[in-house]
Amino acid sequence: MNQTRRTFLQATMAAGTIAVATSAGLLSPRTVLAAWPKSAFNATTVEDAMKAIAGSTKAADSKEISVEAPDIAENGAVVSVTVKSKAANTEQISVLVPENANPLCSSYITTSAVDGFVTGRIKMRKTSDVIALVKADGKLLTAKKPVKVTLGGCGG
């Protein structure tokens, strides 16, 4: 049996197994998708979001955390943000924007197998700080970067 046929048969059997499990109700999208901390994403203040996502509002400023974002965002609907953590044992990285209706933009749970690094695009309603909240070794660390928004992204 050639390798291409073997690979095709393995993929077909895996897809068939997933289809049967899904149709039987054993596998639903909710169980497959990542955990969704609804209360954290629905919070309307930075403090409420921090408490919901990390269990505390006590965070220390840290030089081990860096936030890279443009000084001026021409369009608040698409603001590129990168958070880097050099803190040992980084467990979680979250991005918050205080001036948004819901400050928590994203949150990532990491393992020791990955670098403390996330990048993505967020929406910003208006000029604000972009806050990185990092949980490392059970401690909460923060860093922030002011971003001026010239064209509103979420509600402006």
Image: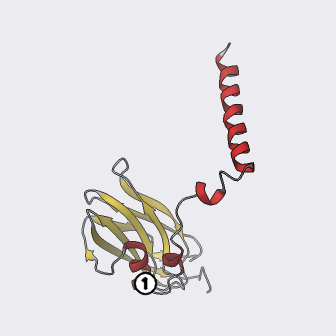
Foreground residue, 92 or 17? 17
Q: Residue at 59% x, 57% y: name it.
A: 31
Relative to 13, say whether 49 is above or below: below
Q: Residue 99 appears at what percent x and percent y?
A: 48, 86
Foreground residue, 46 or 30? 30
Colour scheme in the image? Answer: secondary structure
**Residue annotated with mark 1:** 48
Q: Is residue 35 visible?
A: yes
Q: Residue at 38% x, 63% y: name it.
A: 92
Q: Residue 46 appears at what percent x and percent y?
A: 42, 83
Q: Residue at 32% x, 66% y: name it.
A: 135
Q: Quadrant of the N terminus?
A: top right
Relative to 3, say whether 108 is above or below: below
The quarter holding residue 110 reads bottom left
Foreground residue, 151 or 3? 3
Relative to 17, say whether 104 is above or below: below
In the picture, measured across the screen, residue 102 lies left or right of residue 71, that is: right
The quarter holding residue 14 reads top right
Q: Is residue 73 visible?
A: no
Tell me which amino acid carries mark 1. Asp
Relative to 108, say whether 18 is above or below: above
Where disc 1 sits, the SS reads helix
Q: Residue 47 appears at what percent x and percent y?
A: 39, 84
Q: Residue furthest right?
A: 23
Q: Quadrant of the C terminus?
A: bottom right
Q: Residue at 50% x, 86% y: name it.
A: 44
Q: Residue 109 appears at what percent x and percent y?
A: 42, 60
